[in-house]
Amino acid sequence: MSDDTTPETTEPKTESHDPAVPEAYAAFMRTGWGERELDLPKHPVAEYAEARRARLAEAFPGERLVLPAGTYKVRANDTDYRFRPDTAHTYFTGNQTSDAVLVLEDGDAVLYARPRATRDTDEFFRDRQYGELWAGRRPSSQEISDSLGIEVRHVKDLPSFDDDRKTRDITTDEELARVASELRLVKDEWEVGELQEACDITTLGFEDSVREWDRVLEFGERWVEGTFFRRARAMGNDIGYDSIVGGGSHATTLHWIENTGPITPGELVLLDMGVEGTNLYTADVTRTIPVDGRFTPLQRDLYDLVFNAQQAGIGAVRPGVPFLAAHHAAMEVLAHGLSDLGLLPVSAEEALDPESKLYARWTLHGTSHMLGMDVHDCGRASADIYPKGDLAEGMVLTVEPGLYFQADDLLVPEELRGIGIRIEDDILVTADGWRNLSAALPRTSSEVEEWMGSLR
């Protein structure tokens, strides 16, 4: 069994500063409680998850497969981070409770889970991590089983797996992790719906942020981060990743998540934010907007260059083309744009040579990654499949070119220094091309200005 999952212990988890519990009090607490069940309807993912488990088991005939959900992680001393289950575990079960383990063996699936404690133990009123009166009411084994359509046993009964059968634990077995990642590359109809919902809620979060622009100007990047998080928690599970709110030169730091700076009139602000829905599928969207509501001529020219690169990247998406097609198409546009700006020391064609890539000084990153339950989805797939393989109908990827001129870059004119621009959308590969799941957010410079004006 993986160390990531902790079975039930006989002693409740308490802290040294908790009051003493005399036996008389404990005995009194175990009496006088009525029965109350949770209302857990049949989960819409149940049938999809069953088919997914069958495909995974077929890839490893005669072997035992173990996929833990994980357990709590300490944030500080006696406080934990909010629990978020392992992606593969939830993909193949639908389960989002902690300390659970999926076991596939001989075509059978058993979910070993930690249900709520019965009232004849101290756990329900003393345990800080699992106790109902401390952390909330966990579902029973039967409730989990009925909801997810899978046999459920208590995690304390999880076998030791010390027999002769080959056992693969996804937390340590690279081959199992690879296959599980590759099975997630093509999204089914239900998954596409979840991703569309995440994108739609993300759109609302962006709109919320612009509506509160007076507060943004007062409190800076922090206000956008908090405003977007409020929408993510109100309508989804969480944010899919730490929001990037890059005002001014902070936009040139690719993963600026401090979000501690000001939002200054006359500058741009880069917003890279995504909502994780209740079933853990996340959006990943970036817009770069003018703080004043209108681009300066220089800002507009640079923005339009990035937009044209993104258009070229999105236009390259269709089944059967290399995953990297979007990147190559976008970089072609950006390299020629940088050449037109007089920044390249060689021709655009020379800079685009894989042995050169001089243009990348100002583009820095790849244009796309897979998207799904993880913001950088399917990351343990074979490189020959992703990123070196071809796109297929049902895959979802980002297309997100950018230009970044560092504040201390002496190779660019002073007026460019400190400007960062990225535009990112979530693209579904369809039978005949693509569909932009995040199209509700405006992308062209004029549309962005009109959108900001309508909301401020």
Image (cartoon, rainbow, N blue to C red):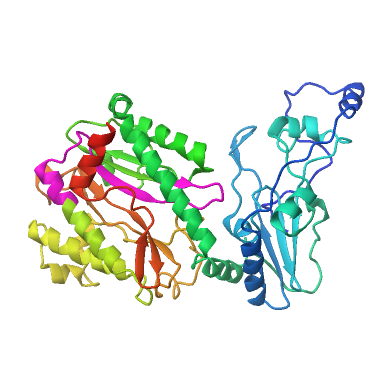
Tell me where residue 284 appears, x and y as whole percent. Answer: 40, 51
Question: From what the image shows, is residue 290 above or below residue 162?
Answer: above
Quarter of the figure with the C terminus: top left
Left or right of residue 361: residue 394? right
Q: Nearer the viewer, residue 381 or 333?
A: 333
Task: Give the residue at x 68% y 47%.
Answer: 98
Asked whether residue 101 is in view, the answer is yes
State the image coordinates of residue 256 (x, y, percent, origin top left). 35, 42
Residue at position x 13%, y 60% in the image = 337
State the residue at coordinates (72%, 23%): 17
Asked if 452 appears above or below 183 in the picture, the reply is above
Q: Is residue 397 left or right of residue 214?
A: right
Q: Is residue 27 left or right of residue 19?
A: right
Q: Is residue 302 a member of the stretch shown in magenta?
A: yes
Position in image of residue 260 (x %, y %) = 35, 32
On screen, residue 368 versus residue 306, left or right, reads: right
* Residue 170 shows in the view: no
Q: Which residues are magenta?
A: 274-303
Q: Quadrant of the N terminus?
A: bottom right
Q: Which residue occupies the foreground of this view, 207 or 15?
A: 207
Q: Nearer the viewer, residue 242 or 75?
A: 242
* Residue 294 belongs to the span the image colors magenta: yes
| Rendering coords of residue 334 (x, y %) | 19, 61
In which quarter of the view is residue 363 placed? bottom left
